[in-house]
Amino acid sequence: MTTTAQQQMPAAPVFCKGIQHYGEAWPDYADKAATAVIAEGQSAISDCCSPQSVYQTQLMADALRYLTLQVCGSKGSGHPGGFASSADAYAALVMLGHTNIVTEVGHHAPGFYSAMFLDSSLEEMGIHTVSDMQARFRERHGLLGHLSGAVPGLLAPAGPLGQGQHFAMAGALLHPEKLFPFTMGDGGMGEPYILSAMMHFNTAYPETTNFMPTLVWNGYSQEHHSMVSRMSNEDMTNYWKGHGFKEVVLIDAKDFDDSGQEGDYIDSTYFSFENRLKFTQAVLEGVDKAARSAMGGTLTAFIIKQMKGAGVHTVGSKSHNLYPADTLEHPQIIAGLQRRALNPEAWQIVRDNFVRAGGGPAVRTSVTEHVLELTPLGKLPLHEFSKDEKAVPSTAMGALVAAVGKADKRFVVTNADGNEASAMKNINDALKIRHPTVDPLYNQEPNGQVYEPLNEDACAGLAAGLALFGSRALWLSYESFAINGWPIVQTVTQAMAELRRKTPSIVTMFTAGALEQGRNGWTHQRPEIENYFAAMMRNGNLFPLFPCDANTIQVAYEWATNSFNKGMVIIASKSPLPVYMTLDEAQHAVEEGAATIYESKSGSKGTIVFAVTGDMVFLPVFEAKDKLETEGYRVRIVAVVNPRRLYRPTDVAWDTVSEPDNKFMDDDHFNALFDADVLLAVSGGPSAPLEPVLLRTRAAKRDTFAWKRGETTASPAEIMNFNGITAEAMVERANILAK
């Protein structure tokens, strides 16, 4: 039996304002819930087998279910079903004091927000009551539809599936004294890299087992049965063990069913009260066993198997999402809430346990709520190459990466295709590849700082996770394969834009651009990802950097490494190339956005300006310059190194992000660089990074030379010719435009 909010009982705590339904006290309530089982000054229950611990864990699970459904129902929107089937496991983790919980399931957001409300963390953002929470749910400046690490108490964002394990592993690496459980759904197991990423991590870091995947095996995905729904319990256990997990703890609700439910997936909330408690006790003991195993040095997974939507308005995929008709007035929603309604006093017991678990509200105790102290780097040992020599940009940067790693022992470099292939063997020589097999020929050592799984997702994920959690890291890749790992970098860059704390920028460097990969053909010629970076410049905290030579790349890397809350993308070649700038000139170019690297002393037929992103592509540009000068033109070549700085302030959401950067080149300096009779924007990749130049230039006659598509070729010159990026084409176009 329930009472409505209009008949609210006097004992309801203030934070409950807005709760629509209350229920009668459960049997034995006075005996088992007179006071919170996590006592004042404690951070966890002392006995997971005690009747009080089990009883109050079940109270917490139902409170989470209730609040999740009511909050979603308040907007007729959101995803209650997935989290509902995990509520028992989530409550067990909290009661055991493990509150640094990550998820890879963005659809679990309303459940995680409910947890942060119940432990009072959301008060940090002015959410004090259930009514406040409903008003702010899925609203701007509130609780967005999928998790954000900007929400007080939450460790990391969650949107695209297959990312949560990276955050958990990064947290485990940085904080070996804490457990980092992360919840994942069996629908999300379709992502190919989740278990393989953890397997490789465990091979490289065998002592770091203090992360614990918590599989919510509920039989369903978003709109259909999950692809692993037909596995037996033995098959599922073996699947995890086949990926290196030595301990797999699986609790199946069906083993406790006394309600006659059919099928392999059971809703535990329909059991008799006694059997509900038995199931809760099994979950509590199972989580405790798994957590102790993980903290004790054994790679461990916990699996809870019960029906999706357990305890809310409906079950299966139909519980996944609410639609506009699913309001708090809908009979099905009302019935679901009434089944889970607690007596008013129980809400205070739940809050007391939540607030004390883990040592205090998550907003005060989560590892990501504090700035991680960084080792001072000092001035990096930049080497100045002279303008009369050639040097390999990637190798020049590698020397600085080695210096960072020598100074900061927490620093990790990740690379799937290998540093040697990118002319960065100097990184491996200095920092060593982390591998259990010691082999000096391959620079392998068990304690190396170079992490090399053959998987861009795993590389990007660990580096991005470490940066988000407060440590320096670097992801290196071929530009052609970067798209396989970029989504998590995009996620983290967006998260950094929202954070309430400083954290090192996520730094990436992509080598072996399209122009260098002729023999490999189009499979290695995919610079189109630069369009992705260009689009993200407008976010406000993403900086693609195009150093033109070995001096500029050093300055760019130092600048990126010393920045905070940004995404830094460096794109450069691994071939010996001319040096165009001194270190001082490079510093100016990175800070200002662009700089002139060549200008004719005279010319009577007009001025041709080349605005260029890249390094190797300068070769045909300088060749075109020679020909145009002989024809009487004055030529200026401008290296566009940091195009984000060339936008107008109104083009970029710079004022909406943490650690904002509002430095933009003013009109006078911009016009001094790019005013011309003819402007040719040239890129070895796509043209989008040159958008700010094309937007602002006053040159009425302008054109672009950029990447079209890949082909198998014998040399960079041949692939540039295939794409029309040749000196002859540039000269011809300049002459046509200049008429």
Image (cartoon, grey):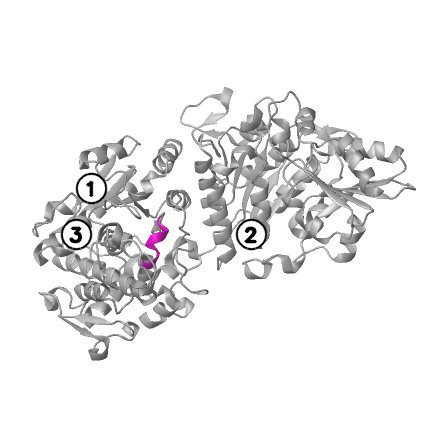
Provide residue 351's location: percent of width, then percent of height: 26, 66
Q: In the image, residue 555 lies at what x, y percent? A: 67, 42
Cα separation between marks 3 and 1: 16 Å
Give the distance between the C-alpha atoms of the residues marked 2 and 1, in whole angstroms: 41 Å
Contact? badges 3 and 1 (CB < 8 Å) = no
Image quarter where the C terminus lies is top right
- Where is mark 1, residue-wise? 250
Q: Residue 237, can we see it?
A: yes
Q: Circle 2 is placed at which residue position? A: 564
Tell me residue 242's x, y (percent).
Answer: 28, 30
Residue placed under numbered mark 3 in the picture: 267
Amino acid identity at mark 3:
Asp
Q: Earlier in the sequence, mark 2 or mark 1?
A: 1
Determine whether the residue tagged by mark 2 lies in a helix, strand or loop.
Answer: loop
| Residue 245 as seen in the image, left or right of residue 685 | left
Residues rendered magenta in the picture? 105-110
Looking at the picture, which amino acid does disc 2 mark? Phe
